[in-house]
Image: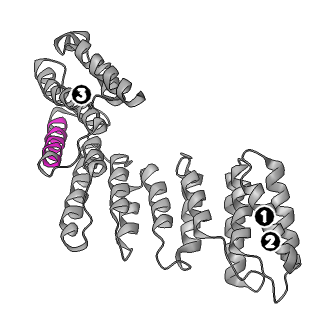
Amino acid sequence: LKLQSSAYENILRVCANVHGSPMAANYSERVLNHMLQNQTEDFCVSSGSLSSCVLAIDRSGDTWRAHQKLLKFVSMYKNGPVLRNFPHPACATSLLNKLAHIMHPAALQQAREVQQAYGDLLDFNVEFLKGYMNVLARHGMAREAEDFMKSQKERSAALWNLLLFGWSRARTISQCERIVEARRCLDEMISESVENGVEPDSFSYCSVINSAAIFKGTADQNELCRNLAAQTYGEAKRRNITIDHVMYGTYVKTLRFTMDSGPERVEAIRDVLDEAISRGQVGRLMMKELSRLTRDELNQLEVKNVVAAYEGRNNHHKS
């Protein structure tokens, strides 16, 4: 079996690289079960083999069964003596990234179970932490994400950005609370940057601005959100943060949500448009938001110039 172990591992790797095949998933389980039944003192199933089996099941389209298999392997490792290894953290991270895009409470619960299973096995694994934060952020669990991040001994820029993204999608709170909390976290990130060197970037500021662009509120709420978004947008420019087509589009989106149609909104959007055009940063999001303005506003903004700038940018990237 020692001589054949590498062959078995290669078979499992092949199965893991086949997408959309229940047959490959089932075969990987059969191979792994055979390996488990024939372990000796000199040979034990490796982390790579366990990971390949989980990935083969996940890539067959059965994320739920992959999740159960991963937890089973970790439990077998903890309880012994069958397994002397556990699936590699990269395997768990891959599963977390899949769960992040399944917008269902069961997926969120499964991610929590994966994190709890690995929590006392890993000292500090950045990719695994990012994977779990990504699940919490995409599911709008901002407060839980913040508590989790602050329990870690290190806080990377990527974790801060996922937290800010989480606040932009936070559930069960108002539009104002979203941007207030996002702005608070950005201020904390900036204050901590003096000590740990973690600097906010374009994504950080864009997430805060986007927190205000979810739905229309009352006049007072809209004004508060617009002022905080304008403060954040202006600060990004003063700090020489890269202002790209995504941030320009997001800021126009915020102005559209927080202002009533009319001359004041046209002028506010025109200022952003002129700058975006001059820098060649008119992107798809900008065009999408402009399409939602009134016909009169579009005429005042001379959208033909914007379309030309958008097409010019696309042609430049294609060339």
Residue 144, relative to residue 240: is it above or below?
A: below
Residue at numbered disc 3: 256
Write the start and end of the magenta stretch as one range. Answer: 221-236
Label 2 Cα neighbours within 10 Å, binned few <14 / some 14-19 / many ≥20:
few
For label 2, the residue is 6
| In-image side of 81 versus 211 (left or right) | right
Give the mark nearer the N terminus: 3 vs 1: 1
Side of 67 where 179 appears, left or right: left
Residue marked by disc 1: 10
Residue at (69%, 76%) from the top-left corner? 75
Q: Nearer the viewer, mark 2 or mark 3?
A: 2
Question: Is 277 located above or below residue 155 in the figure?
Answer: above
**Which of the two marks, 3 or 1, is nearer to us in this view?**
1
> Residue type at mark 2?
Ser
Do callouts 3 and 1 mark residues in contact (Cβ within 8 Å)? no
Residue 12 is situated, as x and y percent measured from the top left of the image, at: 78, 62
Q: Position of residue 296 (x, y in %)?
A: 20, 10
Secondary structure beneath dot 1 equals helix
**Which label was assigned to residue 160?**
none
Quadrant of residue 244 within the rendered picture: top left
Q: Is residue 111 above or below residue 235?
A: below
Q: Amino acid at mark 1?
A: Asn
